[in-house]
Amino acid sequence: MQRRWKTSLAAVAVVAALLGVAACGSSGSSSSSDDTSAGSPNSGQSVAIVGYSVAEAAHKVTSADFQKTDEGKGVTFTSSYGASGDQSRAVESGLDADLVHFSIESDVTRLVKSGQVADTWNSGPTKGIISSSVVVFAVRKGNPKNIQTWDDLVKPGVEIVTPNPGSSGAARWNALAAYGQVIAGGGTEADAVAYLDKFFANVVALPGSGRDATTAFDGGTGDVLMTYENEAILARQNGEDFDYVIPDTTLLIENPAAVTTAASPAATSYLDYILSTDGQQNFASKGFRPVIDGVDVGDVEGATDPSNPFPTVPHLLTIEKNFVSWSDVSKKFFDEDTGIVVLSIAKSGKA
Amino acid sequence: MVLAVASEGRAGRTKRLGRPGHLTKVSGLGLGVSLIWFSLLVLIPLAAVVTTAAEGGWDAFWHTITNEQTFAAIKLTVSQAFLVTGVNIVMGTLIAWVLVRDSFFGKRVVEVLIDLPFALPTIVAGLVLLSLYGPKSPLGIDIANKPSAVTVAFLFVTLPFVVRTVQPVLEELEGDVEEAAASLGASRFTTFRRIILPSLIPAIAAGAALSFARAVSEYGSLVLLSGNLPFKTEVTSVRVLSSVENNNTEAAAAVATVLLVISLAVIVILDIVQRRMSRRG
């Protein structure tokens, strides 16, 4: 009897392990190398990238191109991708990282506080930002509910899916965009709060992460998914069948990156490469808006209009111009007891 | 773990070797290794959680767990866990009964498949549940973003526990006792109630404890289907994650401690039931 128990337990363990490995395979580590290129300045060095999930596709193409340059010859890459906050906490508690690329600034700030990133990380020309995008509405194919504006979102009967701003740091961009566009349109803070209340009243699902939200939307939940332009483009490149709408007023999403204090020189070279026109072109091909001028983005597959993938947004809000700073935002909007967004979400649940 | 609990149910009946308090060298070594192992994996991490929760002081702890939204999440999680455990006690015993006493085509397959919820990564379970019971359900059942989504997810992941603890006990049950009861004029129902059920209760209690504890901590399998709506479908694990995301580890630990205490209480109660019954048996 006991033996049978043991065999069945062992079988279960093996299956679990195999499935676990299979599941990790897609999002886990990967490495690549080019051994035929001795003699370049960074040859033999390795760069450990720790990034947030959506950045993976961009780094894959960009690091491969970097390895073809003089600086990048012989450099090997290892990488780890996951939820931005989780990744940042992982590095804080010892995950080996040369280059970190997060969704929001506070995830880098955490590492500055722990002394793993120099406090001058955002002193460069792009202020530490290496990729950017805008908040968009993903809608069902053909936009059957004709959702074009923020006002359309709060109409009765419109079902919104947005990742949970509580558990997903990246989802905070969406909530801030919803709030900020009211102010930008001449509304008062009270108007903006009233809008948020209506917005969250229409939310039918608050999945834990951007990835989960896309999965839920894909599974048929809701009429509109709050997402970012780059995620929408990437998802469409991967065969997802939905449209997306860029509202006239939206928020600029800026994703920071930094080299750690323990980083190899190759990591700095790679960061420089990302910020070059070539590097930004690679990022653009995966849906990110360039953070420097003069980048020929060419055709971007998956964009609504591939030949004009990143149309100018008439009223583009930024954290710096419209919200002071991330630390301010964290306190004012996301404090667990008094945050405007937190209270709005709680109110929606009691309605 | 399941194995240990399952066999513990019968421990009352097997006579212990040696007197308590007198350990041979080998068994002393075994005890030492077990305790260190248990401490490293369980005791120390749990102590750390409780310590972190205590760091903020009683006021902070109380403030955290009485937050309306957190409290609603705890209430939902615990009540659903109780409900699901109740269902498992009945359905799990029934499945175990069918697997042991009946033979039918495909029995072996079912036997293997029972463990599947155990083996699946929970997020995969979540995907399966979303496609089966979400808006695009081929069965026409859409429970996405409703409280019943939490129930279904809990049911899915806790299914194996009672089945797997009851099954071996049922298999070892001597048929002649039942025959004797029958020959003495007991009806089938009386035989089940007076003869079979008492021997099964320790195993059922052990399975119930496991299934309750598992349900209380569940996260992965329900995030896609439940929608995490506050006051409606948001479970406690999501509240813990929110606190972690806000760098508020004390609050996260406080909520975790509440779950820990509730689970512990349930396990202890079920353990008492189990001991009582096995002593009587």
Image (cartoon, grey):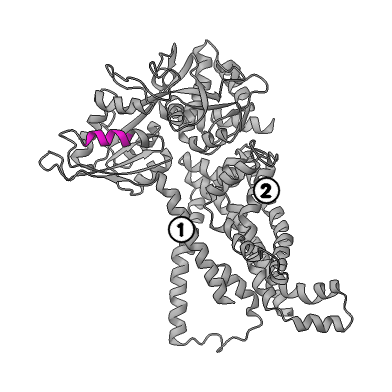
How many other residues sit within 10 Å of disc 1, few (<14), some (14-19) or many (≥20)?
A: some
- Residue A158 in picture, x, y percent from top left: 64, 23
Work out whether B130 lies above or below A202. below
Answer with the quarter of the image where residue A350 lies. top right
Answer with the quarter of the image where residue A273 lies. top left
The residue most toward the right is B185
Q: Which residues are magenta?
A: A59-67
Viewer-proximal residue among A185 and A209: A209
How many other residues sit within 10 Å of disc 2, few (<14), some (14-19) or many (≥20)?
A: many
Q: Amino acid at mark 2?
A: Thr
The residue most toward the bottom is B18
Work out whether B168 lies above or below B130. below
Q: Main secondary structure of the magenta part?
A: helix
- Residue B206 in picture, x, y percent from top left: 65, 67
Q: As drawn, is A254 to the left or to the right of A135?
A: left
Identify the secondary structure beneath mark 2. helix
- Residue A1 in picture, x, y percent from top left: 59, 77
Identify the disc placed on residue B151.
2
Instruction: Give me the chain letter of mark 2.
Output: B
| Residue in view at x 43 percent, y 40 percent | A83
| Residue in view at x 60 percent, y 75 percent | B7
Check disc 1 and report the residue beneath it: A17
The residue most toward the left is A39
| Residue in view at x 43 percent, y 15 percent | A316
